[in-house]
Image (cartoon, rainbow, N blue to C red):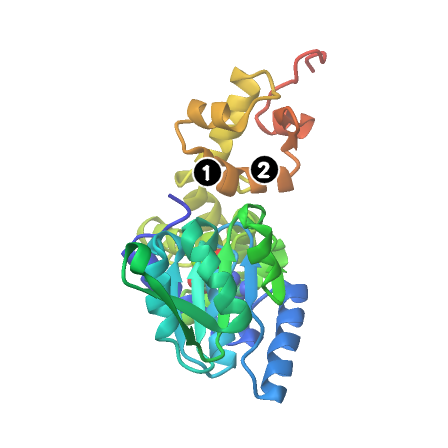
Amino acid sequence: MRGDAGDAERQAEAALRPRGLGDFVGQPQVRDQLSLVLDAARARGRAPDHVLLSGPPGLGKTTLAMIVAHEMRAQIRITAGPAVQHAGDLAAILSSLEEGEVLFIDEIHRMARAAEEMLYVAMEDFRVDVIVGKGPGATAIPLDLPAFTLVGATTRSGLLPAPLRDRFGFTGHLDFYTADDLTTVLRRSAAMLGIDAEPAGLVEIAGRSRGTPRIANRLLRRVRDWAQVRGSGRVDRAAARAALTVYEVDERGLDRLDRAVLGALCRRFDGGPVGLSTLAVSVGEEAETVEEVAEPFLVREGLISRTPRGRVASREGWAHLGLTPPGEPTA
Ligand SMILES: Nc1ncnc2c1ncn2[C@@H]1O[C@H](COP(=O)(O)OP(=O)(O)O)[C@@H](O)[C@H]1O
Ligand SMILES: [Mg+2]
């Protein structure tokens, strides 16, 4: 749900995507490190090292992949792990790459194993072994590839096999954004979309966007809707508060899934510890969605924690729901 966007959402997103590294808000460390990698490659007149980007959905991985190509004035080829199910799929892509091109593989942790091994060789030696024929008579014909830059994105860098992870020259981990950075993102978006917005309105939206630019931009459009239909047309603090109440985003930015997970943990499992899959079933979601989307934010906010025995609600987590942890005197 929050992971992938519909067509209209995707278009709106593409329109707001920063194109150069200079427009990319926040993440100062990743930005600085990446700019060094790119500047050095440019100075040497070579394709930059392979880049791995990891972090929860909506933090700018795809955006950065496109920025790498833009900054290098290179073409970009885009595919995704689930689309690479056979080594042949990858061989076809690799063998058609041109010098200096950027190959972006989104959700790279979901690529087929057989393709992974082909990718190791391509990344390291710029070579692909094309298999001709079938069965015992099959032969591998080595094909040299032009120098290219692989940009991989993953929500789960822990799931990548070490040999793959090690072949990236640079790994950037994207973390949730501060409310200030999100306010900057929103100011830029409001200007680009011609939305009449007051700073206090943008601050209110930023504070409820789960540290995620994608969510901030989406909420901005929803608040604009509210302002146009039920308000004065202006995105101010009152409009933001009213609209976000309608969309079930609470003051801390938790949305329905976040609250469902926290609620199940406290109410059904007495605050845990409870295993991920049990928790996911109890909120009717895929374990993967709970783990990649809801959990990182709840952990970051200090509302739940991960322990070897399972997920546990913190005191703050209980308090956020207006509940008292078991064994504590009720106020
Ligand atoms: N650092 C940033 N500055 C400004 N906008 C951003 C930034 N990161 C992400 N965005 C916005 O959020 C949207 C989602 O980012 P995206 O790169 O697609 O996330 P991911 O690939 O990590 O899921 C983009 O369309 C872009 O408009
Ligand atoms: Mg993406």
Other-residue count near label 1 (Cα within 10 Å), few / some / many at <14 / 14–19 / ≥20:
few
Q: Is mark 1 within 8 Å of ligand 1?
A: no
Residue 188 visible to an observer of this rendering: no
Residue 275's x, y, as percent?
55, 24
| Res 84 quadrant in image | bottom left
> With respect to residue 29, does 307 lie above or below?
above
Q: Is residue 72 visible?
A: yes
Rendered view: 245 above or below 165: above
Density class for disc 2 (Cα within 10 Å; few <14, some 14-19, many ≥20) is: many
* Residue type beneath disc 2: Leu
Q: Nearer the viewer, residue 261 or 124?
A: 124
Q: Nearer the viewer, residue 95 or 260?
A: 95
Residue 268 picture location, percent across and down:
52, 16
Which residue was labeled with disc 2?
298
Q: Which residue is mark 1?
A: 288
Question: What secondary structure is found at the residue carrying circle 1?
Answer: helix
